[in-house]
Amino acid sequence: MKNLARRIGSVAALLLCAAPAFADELNMPRGVTDISREIYDLHMLIFIICCVIGAVVFSVMFVSIIKHRRAAGHEPADFHENTQLEIIWTIVPIIILVAMAVPATQVLIAMYDTGGEDMTVEVRGYQWKWQYKYLDDDYNRTFSFFSNMSTTQDEINDKAEKGENYLLEVDNPLRIPANRKVRFLVTAEDVIHAWWIPDFGIKRDAVPGMLNELWTIVPEPGIYRGQCAELCGKDHGFMPVVVEVMEEDAFDAWYAEEVEREAIRVENLSKTFTGEELMAEGESVYNTFCASCHQANGRGVPPVFPSLVGTPVATGPRDEHIRMVLDGVPGTSMQAFGKQLDAAQVAAVVHYERHSWGNNAGDTTQPRDVIAIQDQAAGN
Amino acid sequence: MSEATLDQVTDHHDDHHDHGPAKGLSRWLFTTNHKDIGTLYLWFSFLMLMVGGLLALIIRTELFQPGLQFINPEFFNQMTTNHGLIMVFGAIMPAFVGLANWLLPMQVGAPDMALPRMNNLSFWILPFAFGMMIATLFMEGGGPNFGWTFYAPLSTTYAPDSVTYFIFAVHMMGASSIMGSINIIATILNMRAPGMTLMKMPMFVWTWLITAYLLLAVMPVLAGAVTMMLFDIHFDTSFFNAAGGGDPVLFQHIFWFFGHPEVYIMILPAFGVISHVIPAFARKQLFGYDSMVYAVASIAFLSFIVWAHHMFTVGMPLAGQLFFMYSTMLIAVPTGVKVFNWISTMWRGSMTFETPMLFAIAFVVLFTIGGFSGLMLAITPADYQYHDTYFVVAHFHYVLVPGALFSIYAAVYFWFPKWTGRMYNESLGKLHFWLSFIGVNITFFPQHFSGLAGMPRRIPDYALQFADFNMLSSIGAFIFGFAQVFFLYVLIHGIRAGKKAEARAWDGAHGLEWTLPSPAPYHSFTHPPVVTEEEAHT
């Protein structure tokens, strides 16, 4: 309530005067890249031209409103055309428009200067998260991860204090190096999304079946935030874009670490795990991806989020269980995790669910079991 | 037909010359009278304005502060979608068709519209179309939730089941609009009084003639788009499904090829109205009649070659971006001509500021602001930052609310005495104007700022830095909403208790409609009037 009162107070202050203190709320950010600054300058140029035209045109009108009133005793004149004037006010706007179009064209051409990139990241929109895939000519140096919003439901539902970066924070930000030309290939898996970082001056729709090309060079390390900008369904408002721009050395070190982690992940796909290993990995996967609906104790919140304790899914045929995790249940909140989790993670979480909270299916689930089902579905 | 039979027919008609409206409900159900149908259209659009406004207030209530307090994101999307659809197809368009019905026969000196039975049908389709569309909100799975632009595949593969009802409703609205525009074209081209050449037609007639052609051209395109959706959903085609070899971007091209002319369908008749109101209250002939006509025609032409400026972020070759940027910027030229002409009409006039004039002046100022933001949006590189933010929301609300809607109010107040035979109460009208004017600016002006600062549109919850402007916007929305309910009171008060109006209710008003008594007789001109120099070129 105190918050509300304070906000009403600041709204009242805004009503009185648009104080300079609010400047960052008032205008387009200048951003940090050359392109974003050129866009900003273009925006300000056109804005000022519009203001000047508006000031001139509206002053003429208000002078007329004050002077040419019947109440002021003004008699109507009798003119209704003036060819010279009409030609002038057709030609002059055209000249102004050309003056606007020239810098706009220059900036646009600069934005289309793709090529010569130092690295490429594929950006893929999903309902309602982003996937970032670092592409490299050496396939062993390619890896990917998902980026989900990390703001909690409690913050959204006013049950907890909202953090500083409310709705603009993610679990895994995209990481790119400073001062290198990064090319983005933007696409989508399901519906159309749009990937946007205001401070870089780039926004592009992520369209299924289409690869859009974007690039940026960010001179300053830092964390930059944006949001999905194309209506993509229920949680369109909850899929932020966060980019962490790192010093070049730090980025290279991080990249090497990720490549190593990826190698281990790939290795895991062909490994046979012990029950303990599966349970440990399964618990961590469960807590990240499943617990928010099915709860840490596996009992869910029936009827919306079913319990997993002693239910046919968790104790019946294992392959059905795997399929449900991979493909989800259409028309319910149970999404398909086949794209987000790899076979080792699915195997671990299925094993965990079948051997926790009193469930005891007595089987083991190995990555190869999951891969067999994935191959089956793909028709191999 | 021989002369004798022609005379007989005429005599026969004369016997029934004074027949008035039928009694009771059948008057409204079966009417073929342009005034009754105009009245139906206008009240229907007012009802839709209230419904669409209610949805807007639900949206603004949720957005009053950050966090989710009242509705869930799924329902929020249904609200934004239906608000847009109802306002565009249910409030603004039928209101202009209502004005056309009332005014065109009177302004061209005809007894009625050219195709009266089709006129009845084109109205009575609408309540069923909108009844069906609004009913989807109560269906299992909810109503349309994909935005009024219904981009595929969100509106096909990922749509709620009710989308089929939505498609059928859009088909019916389209049929209604096509019939309405055929009727308007037929009336204007065939039923003008002798002496009223094309370049002597009142501006409202001119703007509606051009609008009707736009409608005829693009409504079938919309019908095609929704039919392809229907096939994708039910018959497993893949027009818009990338997985089947289709293209989601194709949908956007088709939609905006309809959608951009649609924008002008909602503003050209407004230009016509303003071109009547300003001369009347400036007591001076409209400046630059010919250039006004040419400007409207140029805008209509340009509207067909700018559609992809709604799609700059979709991904297009550089040449395409440049073409659509330049063609869009060009629209500023004829639009500027219109604004300059209106101001020149006011210049050295003898102005008074009754309610219609207040709405018209507010139109000129606020529509121009919407035009400026439109010009900014045309600049492709800058559009990358504006696109799909509240800056766009502010822009199109400035051209549609203080643009199209204010012009409709100006028209209603201006012709109210001709329609009802009574004057509305001037103080009440002015109060309605000022409440609306203040409300609309408090609502939409701050949205420019939140958009520039980076707030995307169509989100149910927002980051904390947008909180102040959203709260302000919500307060303004409630002021504006209240003002429109108050408008209903002003109307009813005027109809019941207003002073008797003279034939020429405004001393500066010109045009054939003002030569008829107030209220105008049931059949406007049974004998073609003589078009004098004074009544032409209003």
Image (cartoon, coloured by chain):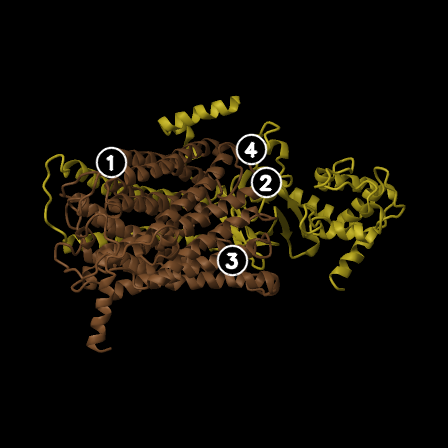
Chain colours: A yellow, B brown
Q: Secondary structure at mark 2?
A: strand
Q: Residues within 10 Å of mark 1 (few under 14, many from 20)?
A: some
**x%, y% of residue B92?**
37, 49
- Mark 3 vs mark 4: tell me if same chain: yes
- Please state the chain letter of the residue tagged with numbered disc 1 in the rendered image: B
Question: Hey, which residue is sitting farthest right in the picture?
Answer: A362
Vertical position of residue B277 compared to residue B225: above or below: above
In the picture, residue A173 is in which quadrant? top right
Give the residue at the far front of this rendering: B15
> Pointers 2 and 1 in contact (CB under 8 A)?
no
Which residue is disc 2 drawn over? A246
Distance CA(mark 2)–CA(mark 1):
66 Å
Number of numbered discs on residues: 4
Q: Tell me the subunit letter for badge 3.
A: B
* Residue occupying image coordinates x 42% and y 27%: A11
Label 3 vs 4, first from the N-terminus: 4
Label 2 to label 4: alpha-carbon separation: 38 Å
Q: Which residue is mark 4?
A: B69
User: Disc 3 and disc 2: Cα gap in Å?
Assistant: 49 Å
User: Which residue is painted at 21% across and 46% down in the image?
Assistant: B278
